Image (cartoon, helix red, strand yellow):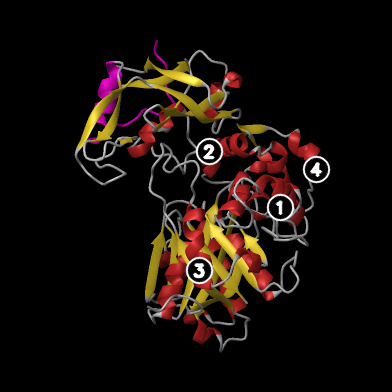
Amino acid sequence: MTVVPFTLPVPNRDNQEFFDKCREHQLVLRRCKDCVTFSHPPRSNCPNCASDNLEWVESPGRGTVYTYTITRQPVSRALAGRVPWAVLDVELEEGVHLISNMVDCDPDDIEIGMPVEVVFETVNDEITLPKFKKA
Amino acid sequence: MESLKDQAAIIGIGETVYTRESGRSELSMAVEATKKAIADAGLELKDIDGMVRFTADSTPQSELAACLGIPYLRYYGELGPLGGAACGLVIQAAMAVSHGLAKNVVVYRSVNGRSGARYGSGVVTTRRGEGSSAFTEPYGLLVPGQSSAMRARRHMHEFGTTERHLGAVAMAFRKHACLNPRAIMYGRPITMEDYLSSKVFFDPLRIFDCALEADGANAFIVTSAENAANLKQRPVYIMSAAQAMPGAIGGRGGSWDDSGASCLAPELFGTAGVTPKDIDVVGFYDHFSPVIITKLEDYGFCPRGEGGPFVAEGRIEVGSEIPVNTSGGHLSEAYLQGMNQIIEVIRQLRGESSAQVENAELGLVDSGDGAGALILRR
């Protein structure tokens, strides 16, 4: 399935691996080898201890909806055909939060605390995005 | 170490009319607001030797100085990003005048925020999928209103905050705007029924929960306390000032539960040597109504989780416990990125507000989501 996203992500040196693994349908997170803390979005250093000794760890992509909003009026004319759309913050079992969207779910059925799991949506040859479905 | 406490004062304020379509350049509006502020202070154009600006502003100091016939500035600076700069700019100006780097520093903001590039459309705030926005914008998280809605939704879940609580904020500020002829929403009162039947933009936020994008400019002048004492205008002293930039922990650039306000409040009150109970009037940066509820909690005006009932009881309205945004604020006066709140608190402390708080001595004002804050005294 090909879906046109709102804005294409522009990967950089600190997060390229995240997008490479998404193409292989794997969700990966940064984990610090020194203090064993997960972090997201991927950065060059650990936000807990400032170490640059980080590894990529595959996540099963399970979590719950921490919060969400449903956009019911387009912010610009170009997005008029997209409303309503839901943006959610998912709290993964690892403790980190991801911004994403639900697939196969009516926006009005979304609830805080709802269990979700990751699925992957292909945008183009370069970009695949992690999205979520009801678990 | 010497603190900034009482070292500097704000001595002149100026504003253009606030409209939906100015029909003029941001530069010409900046000049008008600055000239008015200089006249209000009892100064002459040649007395200005410093200017600080929003990074987001299109008017460079060099152009503004040229239009005022000022040959050169001894001090200049700027602060980003986007809207939360106003209180931080006051800090820059106060440091400059208290250390002799300049004598009279103009803080200004000029923006065609309704007829030109609108914050609410995302053209000002999006980052084209670069940096951390690679993890937000591809999912349609594009404008600050959506983040504010997500934080509000979580607050509702944790504390039982309701849409009527958000409506109480919008109604209080509209009530204040109806006392203020400068407010864009002057003469247009709203009821809770109007609120609840209005369009939902970013669920749970409705149109009345969002800042009123506007065209206009405003400015004020910061000078040393010593200099202020020799002027005819009544000075408003900067009793305490603080900034906060929380580390970007969550996907949106910060956690959902913390704000700059909760980080800087202890320092802000500590330096001034006062508590929230001592504050007579407040000017909160209200880009969206739920931030009023969380700021009341973060600054300690009420316990955490009780901001909703606090506003529903009318306790932020003029004539009650802690009047907030007595000019109508961003929701109902105009969205000039925190500058109009500073100006309104100055008016209150000079006894010149259209919704005057009796005998107001101490005011608290902030910008952004607590990016900066000031305690001002008359």
N-terminal-most mark, 1 or 4:
1
Q: Are marks 1 and 2 on the same chain?
A: yes
Closer mark to the observer between disc 3 and disc 1: 3
Sequence-wise first label, 2 or 4: 2
Q: Amino acid at mark 4?
A: Thr
Comes first in the chain, label 1 or label 2? 2
> Dot 2 surroundings within 10 Å: few (below 14), some, or many (20 or more)?
some
Q: State which tag comes first along the sequence, 3 or 1.
A: 1
Amino acid marked by disc 2: Ser
Labels in figure, total: 4
Circle 1 residue: B173
In front: label 2 or label 4 = 4
Q: Marks 2 and 4, Cα distance to the nearest angstrom?
A: 27 Å
Q: Secondary structure at mark 2?
A: helix
| Disc 2 target residue | B121
Q: Which residues are magenta?
A: A1-24
Left or right: residue B272 compared with residue B199: left
**Is residue B299 found inside the magenta-colored segment of the image?**
no
Binning the other alpha carbons within 10 Å of mark 3 as few (below 14), some (14 to 19) or many (20 upward) gives few
Query: Of marks 3 and 2, which one's residue comes earlier in the chain?
Result: 2
The amino acid pointed to by label 3 is: Gly
> In this rendering, do the residues under marks 2 and 4 share a single chain?
yes
Query: Which residue matches tag 3?
Result: B270
* 1 vs 2, front mark: 1
Q: Position of residue B319 (x, y in %)?
A: 78, 62
Q: Is residue B330 visible?
A: yes
Residue B168, x across and y down, in percent: 73, 46
